[in-house]
Structure formats: C-alpha cells, structure tokens
Amino acid sequence: PVHRAWWKESNVYQIYPASFKDSNGDGIGDIPGIISELDYIAGLGVDIVWLCPCFKSPQVDMGYDISDYKDIYEKYGTLSDIDDLISGLHKRGLKFVMDLVVNHSSDQHPWFQSSISSKDSPYRDWYMWKKPRYAADGSRQPPNNWSSAFGGSAWEYDANSDEYYLHLFAKEQPDLNWENPKVREAVHDIMRFWLDRGVDGFRMDVINFISKDPAMPDAPITIPTNKYQSGAKFFANGPRLHEYLQDLGKILKEYNAFSVGEMPLVFDLNEIIKVVGFDRNELNMIFHFEIVNMDHGPTGKYSPHSWPLTELKKIVNKWETFMQTNDGWNAVYLENHDQARSVSRFASDAPKFRKIAAQMLATFLGFQCGTIFVYQGQELGLANVPKTWGVDKYRDLESLNHYEEKAAAGEPKDVLDRILSEMQKKARDNARTPMQWDTTANSGFSSVTPWMDVNEDYKEWNAKAQVNDTSSVYAYWQSVFRLRREFKDVMVYGTFILVDDLNESVFAYKRVYGSSEALVVTSFKDTEIKWTVPKDYVETGKILLTNYDRSDIAEEIVLQPFEAFVLLI
Ligand code: TEU
Ligand code: CA
C-alpha cells in the first residue's frame, strides 16, 4: 500500500511575483499585491502557494540571482509583508513555500564580493575557482569546455587572480562550492531562518547540480556546431548529491516541511528514487524535464521538433509506474515560469478550441498520481504571447542571449525569424506576461505600463470573466481539485494504469484503488474521433467531469475536438 502523507494530498499554485499584481503603481508586481488576491487563490481550491524568488537581488535572472538570502527585494516589499502573506495564507488554511536558490548566488552577494576580492579571502573557497588552460598557440582558455545555460562558456575569467570561476547560468550567478562545509552550513542556516519565520517548505532550484565531479573533465561533444558543450554528465546528480540532500532532509523533517527539487537533465531513474523514495529522507518529490523538453530540436530549445502523443504517454507512464512501484512520488506539471503556456504548446489556443483545450489539459494533468502544480494564469487558460511580437518585447536573458548570439554571428534574417518563431512557442517569457485580472487598462495588473507588456487578449481572457462563470477554465480547475479531495483514495492514492497505449489521438488512463476505479479520457485531437469505452465503464460508469456536457456513455463514442471526461465506478 502507498504511504499516505499530507503533501501527497496537497496541490500547489505557483506565483511569479513580478507579474502577479502591482499594488503601488510602479509597474512591477509585489507582495501586498499577492495579499490582495488571497481569496482568489484560496477560491481555486489549492493547498499550497509557491512563490518564486522574492529575495534581494540585482535581477539579472528575475531574482534567481540572490544577493541577500534573508531579505526581500525592495520592489516586492519587506520582511513584514512576507510575514503578512504567511499569516494571510495560514488563516485560510494554505501553506507557503519559498524558492531556495542555492546552487549559485548573485555575483553581488557579499560572499562572492569577498571571494573575488583576493585569493586569500576566507570566502575564496565558497565558489568554484580554477586555473586557466593554455592552448597549443599559447592562448588562455577556460578550465574546461562546459557551456553556460544562458550562452557562452560556463567560466568567467578574473584578471586580478588569473583564475576562472564557474557559472552554470549567467556570469552574474557564480556556482557555490558545496564541497566546502561552511557553504552547506550557510544553506542550512538560511532554511532555518525561513522555517522559523513560518515558511512551510521549499522548491529547490536546480538542486541536482550542487555536487560536481571534482575533476571537472571536458564534456563530450553533443552539438558539434557549438563551441561549448553541456557538462551535465559531470554536474547533474553528482557524487555527493545524496549526502547533501540528506542533510537538508533532516531539517525538513524536523519542521515537517514540504520539498520539491527541480532536477533538469536526469539520466538515471535509480538516482531519482534515492532522492524521493519514501524512507530516504531527502526530498518529497522532484520536477523532471522530459515532458517540457519534448519539443526541443536537435540543436536545442530554439530548434523545432514535433512529437507524437505516444511519446507523451511513454514519459507519463514511465514516471507514474516507476514511482508507484518504488514508493516514490511525482510532481505533476506542464507549466511554470520557465515554460510556455500549455494550452498553446500541448493543445490549441485557436479561439474556437482554447477553452475546451485548456479544460482537457486540466483533466489530463489533474487526475494523475502525484502532487499537481498549477502556474498563475494556467487556471484561466492563458496563452503564449502574440505571434506579432517582435524581439524587443521579450525580456528574458535566456532567449535574448540566444537570439543576440545568432545575430552577432551574422545569421541571415530568415534564420533569425525562425528563432523568433520558436521563441513565440517556447520562450520563458510566454509565462511571464502580467496576470490578467480584468478588462481595465493593463489588465487590472497595474495602474501604469507594466515592466512587460500584457498579452493583447486580456479583454476576453481574464480572471473577472471566469470566477463566477461555472463553465470557465477556472471553474473547471475548481472541480478538478474538489474531485481530488472528494475521491481522495482513488484520485490521490489509486494506481495509475495507462489505457489504449498506442492511440495517437486519445490519452486515457485509469486510477484504481481497491474496488473503486476512475477512467480519465482526453482527446488531443482538433477533430472528432471515434473511441471505444472499456466495457466495465459503459455499464456502471458515472460521469464525474466533462468539458462538453457529455451525459451518456456508450461502448462506441465520438469524442469531440479536445474532449475530456472522467468516469467513476
Ligand atoms: O531553471 C533551471 C533550468 O535548467 C531551466 O529550466 C532553465 O530555464 C533552462 O536551462 C533554460 O533553457 C531554474 C529556474 O527555474 C530558472 O528560472 C533560473 O533561470 C535557473 O534555474 C537559474 O537559477
Ligand atoms: Ca509594485
């Protein structure tokens, strides 16, 4: 039998502070803005709010570059605002999870400022410094060929000390050296600081990158046209990861805290079960990237790639089955602040399908075995930015660096246009446009022009239009969360079984718990399609949820475009 736990029965709503709600008219979202919408969030029926980084930061990477782990970014508010947010959530029975970004800090953090000031600094060894290499022609080279996730080398040269420091992300995000016990103690101290303040847990940024192979060998050449290569093999799920996570796990356990680790580039599921196995005392669950990387092409994210539905089935089935046979737990998501909008990416945002398609995805996602994560705006079926947006409207360094690198290399206009069109499909900025609250100026997000343009569709697609409409995407998500609660045994703890594995149009699965069973049927097709309902369900299946007002079930049915329904026996 599956172990029960409160965090398995909880569902999470993710907030991106810059884009949620601006309370003081500076065009940037803030904590008082979040507090003013707590009833909206609680009304959705979620249990936990995860807030993306809100700490002091120069904002090179939207707060994933932290310069003070124990203070708040001034444009978002103050420590006392956070206290009010926590008590406002707790009053409504919700928990509060913060982002713990400790693979790297900001280069403006006093630790790094001291580290770079001199080789003799007591903080020198808090970051990863290495001597240059020299090529045959005598030119100075980085210590290895690793690439940064945001372009170029993962190493930055410091002339003062004639050494390079490692940054797997931007050069303003130097990697902390977890081999140093002082660094680990500092992280433990940060965790206790927030847990003592009432925080209920953490989402841990790229937490599987914290232990690197100390030899730091050159990475194999995977994309020959690139100068630098992914060193993931030597820093993802590295040699001391479990030791470090067990230390964090002890603290989490002490506070009965929630934890989800972000884990890109996982190659071995057995490494994952060591993290999330019930008795391991490391983390509750992790985010894997197999689904959200499905549409990345041969030369990376901004090259196109299409996938058959059976590919999605293989991935979902693999993780669901693996966790239930190994006593682990899944984090289930399609969206976050790094991913494009799911309705645009996995279904259809064409006006005639958008609402139905968003509800279909809510069904597909919402009844899987795992903790469900919904990202702000997903509950409204918000879509990607308009195809008409030029590169000047984008704000994120990840896509802009990529585009500018290609432009600087002299790529012709048609190549750059193709990159822009891939950005419209996959760029992180698709998720970062301001929240759409109502039909007033700036979508009710702010009284002034926001830091990033609002999606032009806000007059039709906004919260106000949906909260009291029982047929809305928002109302549909409310039903999903209500049903998960009402039928907890089967919907939370039931075994996941894939149905009709080879069908390229319909994704269907069962959840089975003792004698109760649910069947979830979702069509990913934009045309009608015939489907055969399993016999047991034709006779006794009761419709729990439908996005088309379906009222009867026969053995042979015709599914409407993006139709979804859930049956219970
Ligand atoms: O993301 C880590 C990560 O690997 C990606 O999802 C990232 O967006 C990708 O490499 C870009 O192609 C986390 C955060 O979620 C992200 O916002 C931060 O930028 C990143 O870590 C660095 O802290
Ligand atoms: Ca503000």
Image (cartoon, helix red, strand yellow):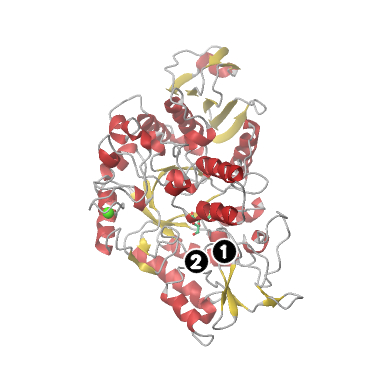
Query: Which one is nearer the viewer's eye here, 490 or 129?
Result: 129
Hey, which quadrant is residue 251 in on the image?
A: bottom left
Can you tell which mark lies on residue 168?
1
- Can see residue 257? no
The residue at label 2 has a CB less than 8 Å from ligand 1:
yes
The residue at label 1 has a CB less than 8 Å from ligand 1:
yes
Residue 411 screen position, x and y as percent = 62, 50
Residue 15 position (above or below residue 155): above
Q: Hey, what amino acid is under mark 2?
A: Gln
Q: Give the residue drawn at x 46%, y 53%.
A: 396
Residue 417 position (above or below residue 483): below
Q: Residues within 10 Å of mark 1 (few under 14, many from 20)?
A: many
Can you tell which mark lies on residue 403?
none
How far apart marks 1 and 2 lie (CA) works out to: 8 Å
Is mark 1 in CB contact (under 8 Å) with mark 2? yes
Q: Which structural element holds mark 1?
A: loop
Number of marks present in the image shown: 2
Taking the view exactly as shown, the residue that stands out farthest to the right is: 136
Which residue is label 2 attached to? 173
User: In the shown orientation, is residue 439 left or right of residue 165?
Assistant: left
Mark 1 vs 2, N-terminal side: 1
Query: Which one is nearer the viewer's eye here, 30 or 1?
Result: 30
Q: Hey, what amino acid is under mark 1?
A: Leu
Residue 74 screen position, x and y as percent = 29, 63
Hey, which quadrant is residue 202 in on the image?
A: bottom left
Q: Give the residue drawn at x 62%, y 60%.
A: 236
- Can see residue 294? yes
Residue 32 screen position, x and y as percent = 25, 53
